[in-house]
Image (cartoon, grey):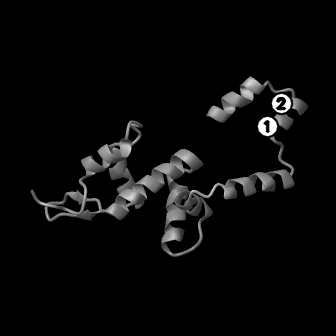
Amino acid sequence: MSFRDYLTIGEVVQKLNAGRGDLSVSKLRYLEDEGLITPERTEGGYRKFSRADVERVELILRLQRERFLPLAVIKTKLDAFDRGLPVPEIEEIETGDVSAGQDKAVDAEASGLLATSDLTREYKIPESFMAELKRY
């Protein structure tokens, strides 16, 4: 049995899907076409995903799922992060720091944005509708 330090594209899909099913071979190819990932290639042209490549794909998926960021914005943030610039969304995901999200809530209040409870009370929006909006 030989040891290799990379995963194939199919292995990456299998590893990262973990029951979610939101990753496919074609999506990985698209991420590469858009310049978000750059896996090495074998002499035969097959993609070789390193541990860092897999972590980057995981990060991209989390930025999409948890921050609802489009790929163009994610690319910009990854480019900045790769240059060593601070990117709060990436730092929060990497460190698991939820306090940054709490700071945003304070900033929203200071900016005059209304909390969900204010919307339901002041504008008579049903709580069930607000709960449905949160799910989306």
Q: Label 1, secondary structure: give it.
A: helix
Q: Is residue 3 above or below residue 112?
A: below
Tell me the quarter of the picture where residue 111 sits.
Answer: bottom right
Residue found at x 50% / y 53%: 71
Image position, residue 44 (x, y; %): 14, 60
Image position, residue 28 (x, y; %): 35, 50
Q: Which mark is residue 43?
A: none
Tell me the quarter of the picture where residue 35 sits.
Answer: bottom left
Residue found at x 53% / y 52%: 63
Residue found at x 34% / y 42%: 24
Tell me the quarter of the picture where residue 104 sits.
Answer: bottom right
What is the three-letter code of the residue carrying label 1?
Answer: Thr
Q: Is residue 42 above or below residue 25?
A: below
- Image quadrant holding the C terminus, namely top right
**Looking at the image, do the residues carrying marks 2 and 1 touch, with CB atoms under 8 Å apart?**
yes
Image position, residue 79 (x, y; %): 49, 68
Residue found at x 37% / y 47%: 16
Q: Label 2, secondary structure: give it.
A: helix
Which residue is at the front of the view, 100 or 88?
Answer: 100
Q: Is residue 71 left or right of residue 99?
A: left
Q: Is residue 67 above or below residue 84?
A: above
**Residue that badge 1 annotates:** 116
Measured Cα–Cα span from mark 2 to mark 1: 6 Å
**Residue that badge 2 annotates:** 120
Q: Is residue 15 above or below residue 84?
A: above
**Residues packed near mark 1 inside 10 Å, few (<14), some (14 to 19) or many (20 plus):** some
Q: Is residue 25 shown to the viewer in this render? A: no
Image position, residue 105 (x, y; %): 76, 51
Q: Is residue 92 shown to the viewer in this render? A: yes
- For this orientation, the residue located farthest to the left is 1
What is the three-letter code of the residue carrying label 2?
Answer: Thr
